[in-house]
Amino acid sequence: MDTQFEWRDEYNIGVDAIDREHQRLFKIINKIFTFREEEKDSQWTCQEGIKYFKGHAVKHFADEEAYMESIGYEGLEQHRRIHREFRENTLPALEQELEHTGYAPDAVDHFLGVCTGWLIGHTLTEDQAITGDRISIWGHLLPGEELAAVKKVIVQLLFDMFHLESQVISEVYGGEKFGKGVYYRLVYGTNQGEKKQEVILVFEEKLLINTVGKIMGLQTGKLDSMLINAARYTARQFVGRVMEHLPDVKAYELKEENLLSYEQFRKIFEREHPQISLLFNTGGAGYFAYCAIAPHMLEDGVGTPIERQNALSEVEKYLAKREEEVKVEEADTRPKVLVVDDSMTIREGIKNLLAEDYQVVPAESGVAAIRIITLDRPDLILLDYEMPVCNGKQTMEMLRSAKEFAQIPVIFLTGRDDPELVRELLSLNPAGYLVKTLAPDEIKRKVDTFFAAPQLLKGDMSALLKQKNALAEMEKCLAEAEEKIKAEQRAKAEQKSDTRPKVLVVDDSPTVRMSLKLLLENDYRLLLAESGVEALQTVAVDRPDLILLDYEMPTCNGRQTLEMLRSTPKFASIPVIFLTGRSDQETVHELLSLKPAGYLLKHLKSEEIKGKIDAFCAKTMSRR
């Protein structure tokens, strides 16, 4: 299996009940990853696995909230809102997509990606905050209802005002540059002069030309002072309409406005925490971002306030300065390097190291990287391999799944150079890799070397791998042998103390076997067999209390397997429940003629299957 999420100690918050449930959710996600790679019965098993995940997640939310309430956790209501958003909005939308596509592989992968990302991110942020280990990253966001209302209003306004069909492509826009931008800041406050809210609108130049410019009949296809002034007032009306839908701020008045350079705009994101940060795609007309910050404003460094007496001159100065900046950008032929790392220290260090010879753009996560690449394609990506939520491998897979990004060269950044990791890196065929512990001048030299001869860095990887491969294989074999011995010892010890009923599941479909194992393993000891012959061998060495036997198997089917069991006196009394995917009268009559303990239809809901097995075992065990 290519994708596997392993539980790490850093995910533990120190509350045993919560930590156990988090581990179980990780385990379920991994099971679904297994199911989606199997061809036979994959839709059914994915459906059952996803239903099981949803049910378990919803129950876990309730248990977690009960725990927080019991300790008087002050962030309980906020936590409930995040749970509710995932439960009532995210999951239903994903399920709808799955059903609409008939559980297509892409839809299943989407479900898994969202759920794993949400689960890991939520575990490392919100749940860590329960015990005070981490500061919640959601502290500056609007309540979900208000954020949803703002999105809805903006989408409707863009259609009403400009007949643009738009969609939100990011709810956590981080101030990335897209095309030639215009950055417009509005500050609102009360009649007492107190500043309460700041709104920044970011327009791609062509969006203004395609909207306000089109309404004005602009023919030049270029920004001018008339268009900027018209856009200012249009934007003020736009923001006013949005604020009408927010009861806490609808009475505020405009106190200040500024046209910003990109550097001034970025300064706001470095010093402030936007409560709203939405990025919209308007279907080819251009990108648009809506950002809101409250309650405190930047005091300086933002730009000259535009007032009635200086509006014309400020707009003219802004256009002149902007035109000069655009010329500088267009004349900059240095290669563009995107640095993706969750460590700010690493991002800033590499940026300072490369800034003289390259245009360096930082990104703090794989998701942010995808957003930046969409908006501003780089020539090279330096990608951290060990990131939380969306790691380097996942980010690279997403890039290669999109034709327009597939050819962008990627060099992995890693803090490790052990042979196993190097082998894992090589299997992804990157342009190369860099160890973060290298001296700065060595990192710079390797990046320079890449642009001079891209294949040389790959050669470094291959050479290192050959040198360490033999030792790594030996160490791996020893570790596996030791772990196998320990596992066998643990299994023997557990078997002696485990009094749960023992159930043998016999089915030629690995996905059916694994789904039943997932369904039953908490309450039963499970044995698995993929054929009638293997079932007989298993029964001979480890007699079960119940056999769940697939009726339609090749070579040695359910009927033949049952007949062989009954021909052996010491196995004849083991109860057998047939598993079948058919419910027609002929099949049912044939099944019943063999006098099994019962039969189960594979398309029943998982809770029905579990309920019938529980009832049967409760009844038969009580007779002993």
Image (cartoon, grey):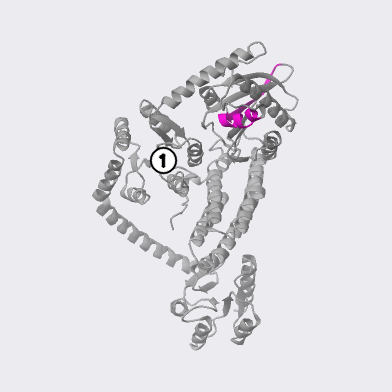
Residue at which label 1 appears: 384
Q: Name the residue located 60 percent from the left edge and 19 percent from the top edge.
A: 225
Is residue 278 in view from this perspective? yes
Q: Work out whether 34 lies above or below 450.
A: below
Mark 1, Cα crowd under 10 Å, few <14 / some 14-19 / many 20+, is many
Q: Is 277 placed above or below 253 here?
A: below
Query: Which secondary structure, mark 1?
Result: strand
Amino acid type of the residue that numbered disc 1 sits on in the rendered structure: Asp
Instruction: State left or right for residue 155 relative to residue 29.
Output: right
Residue 6 placement, left or right of 89: left
x, y (%) of residue 136?
57, 37
Residue occupying the point 49% across, 89% down: 567
Q: Quadrant of residue 250?
A: top right
In the depicted structure, whether residue 259 falls above or below residue 23: above
Direction top: furthest residue: 309
- The x, y position of residue 617, in whole percent, is 61, 74
Total of numbered circles in the picture? Answer: 1
Looking at the figure, which quarter contains the N terminus?
bottom left
Residue 586 is covered by the magenta coloring: no
Q: What is the quadrant of the C terminus in the image?
A: bottom right
The answer to which quarter of the image holds residue 238 is top right
As rendered, which of 99 and 507 lies closer to the eye?
Answer: 99
Residue nearest the observer in this picture, 297 or 187: 187
Whole-percent x and y of residue 235? 66, 26
Q: Is residue 296 visible?
A: no
- Is 283 left or right of 461, judged from the image as shown? right
Please say whether residue 200 is one of the residues in the magenta stretch: yes
Q: Name the one closer to the observer, 330 or 532.
A: 330
- Magenta stretch, residue numbers: 193-214
Q: Residue furthest front?
A: 219
